[in-house]
Amino acid sequence: MKILKWSLISLAILIVALLGYLAYLGAFSSLKVAEMKMGPYVLVFEDYMGPYSGIGPVLNRVNASLKEVGIESSKGFGIYLDDPKLVKADKLRSKLGFIIEAKDQSQVGKRYKVMKWPAQNCLTAELPIRSNLSYMIGPLKAYPAFAQYAKEKGIKTSQAMEIYDMPARKIFFIMVIAK
């Protein structure tokens, strides 16, 4: 009986600790969706096809290459072109890289593609980066919130972008409002 009592107490403590950690990560907080103009940005990127969970090495590679040519960027990004509910994981397309200053564009050379993201009206939300789990929790919260907001307002959306702002320790979720 004593073992059962201590096992239940230990389990309860573990569950409370896990729930506390998830709350700290923002899993239970609501995201505030807003409409605002985002951009313009100069994006240095690499195309990627595969599961969205595999983007880390691509971002690390682009960042290392930028540092080799003397470009420091603290804002990574991902533009996600496919809905993972509709497309198989190995066929998901994305553009992954970093936001750079326009003056640094000529230093990139032919290593990477460069694209200008124009200023455009978007749905936005943000989540603090508190651990690597933030990168998984964020999309699970942001995209359903965008879908609900767009449905309520009668808005059509197109591509999604996430900006990983390391100095601010935030992920900015962006969904372009279709014209």
Image: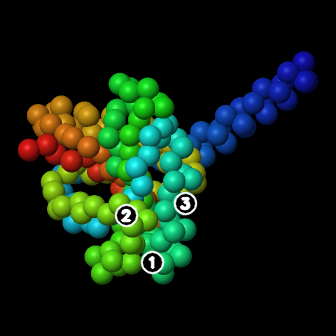
Residue hosting label 1 = 71
Q: Residue at x 50, y 57 (%)?
A: 59
Res 138 seen here: no
Alpha carbon separation for disc pair 1 and 3: 14 Å
Residue hosting label 2 = 44
Q: Looking at this view, is 92 or 69 the one in front?
A: 69
> Mark 1 is on which residue type?
Ile
**Total count of labels:** 3
In the displayed structure image, the side of residue 33 where residue 4 appears, left or right: right
Picture quadrant where residue 30 is located: top left
Res 164 seen here: yes
N-terminal of the pair, mark 2 or mark 1, is 2
Element type at mark 3: helix
State the mark number for residue 60: 3
Label pair 1/3, CB-CB below 8 angstroms = no
Element type at mark 1: loop
Judged from this view, the residue extending furthest toward the front is: 110
